[in-house]
Amino acid sequence: MFTGIITGVGRLAAKRAHGGGMTFEMEAGFPLDEPREGESIACNGVCLTVYSIQDRRFFCDVSPETLARSNLGRLAVGGRVNMERALRPSDRLGGHIVSGHVDCQAEVTGREGLSDYTLFNFALPATTSRYVVEKGSVAIDGVSLTVNTCGAGTFAVSIIPHTLRETTLGEWRPGSLVNIEVDIIGKYVERLLGITSASSETSRPVIDAGFLARHGFL
């Protein structure tokens, strides 16, 4: 699990095709204190399992599904990446609960400077936009952000100078494709409500004397 509070910006040092997917060699922009083989690091919001950790460098395998679902497949060698190490139980939850499982990509449709802030507009698939709610949370390229406004297939966020400076968000331009992970709570609620609504009245057990007797109450 992650929080969407970026630990630092790293870069893609090298990549090669491997088993239908890719193997990336990454370089973190921060010290990897107490590294553990097989730990998770989110790269542009994608949870990746890392190995062969040497100082600030590590390797990770990226599956074909991840390459198709996220913007990692278009990442060029030398490209900058938002990185976050996995959440410790004792850490402050400064952003929101992020799983590192990208739902889709969104396109930046607008960028506008508003005094010290930068307003970004996005277009995303309707199947995903229903989970984006005004003043709710969304992870974009791994960064936890608050939704300013949203509509059918669109939403906007306002970025403070610190976030623009300390992440790759300053590189976004109209036409950029970014990774989106919506708030996981909404998806679970929808799933549970869908199962409940699919249950018809006739499928529910009738509580009568026979039911009580069969279950040991009489």
Image (cartoon, grey):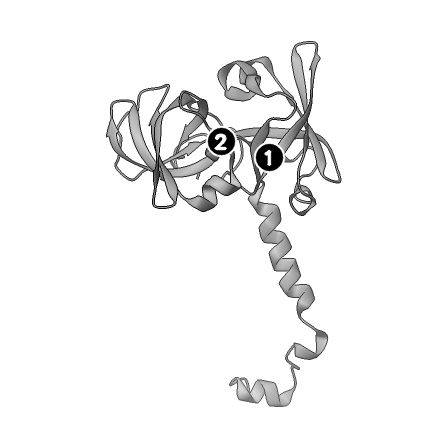
Is residue 99 at all visible to an observer of this figure? no
Is there a contact, CB below 8 Å, between mark 1 and mark 2?
no
Using the rendered view, name the quadrant where residue 14 is placed: top left
Please name the residue that numbered disc 1 is placed on.
Answer: 138
Image point (70%, 73%), residue name? 200
Q: Quadrant of residue 190?
A: bottom right
Q: Residue at x 51, y 33 (%)?
A: 71
Q: Residue furthest top?
A: 115
Is 10 left or right of 183, judged from the image as shown?
left
Dot 1 crowding, Cα within 10 Å, few <14, some 14–19, many 20+: many
Pick the quarter of the image with the C terminus: bottom right
Instruction: Name the element at disc 1.
Output: strand
* Residue positioned most to the right: 151
Q: Amino acid at mark 1?
A: Val
The foreground one among 162 and 216 is 162
Q: Position of residue 12 (x, y in %)?
A: 39, 25
Three-letter amino acid code at disc 2? Arg
Residue at mark 2: 74
- Above or below, 154 against 80 in this view is below
Identified at 55% across, 18% down, the residue is: 171
* Vertical side of 160 occupied by 130: above or below: below
Where does residue 68 sit, x and y in percent of width and height? 50, 42
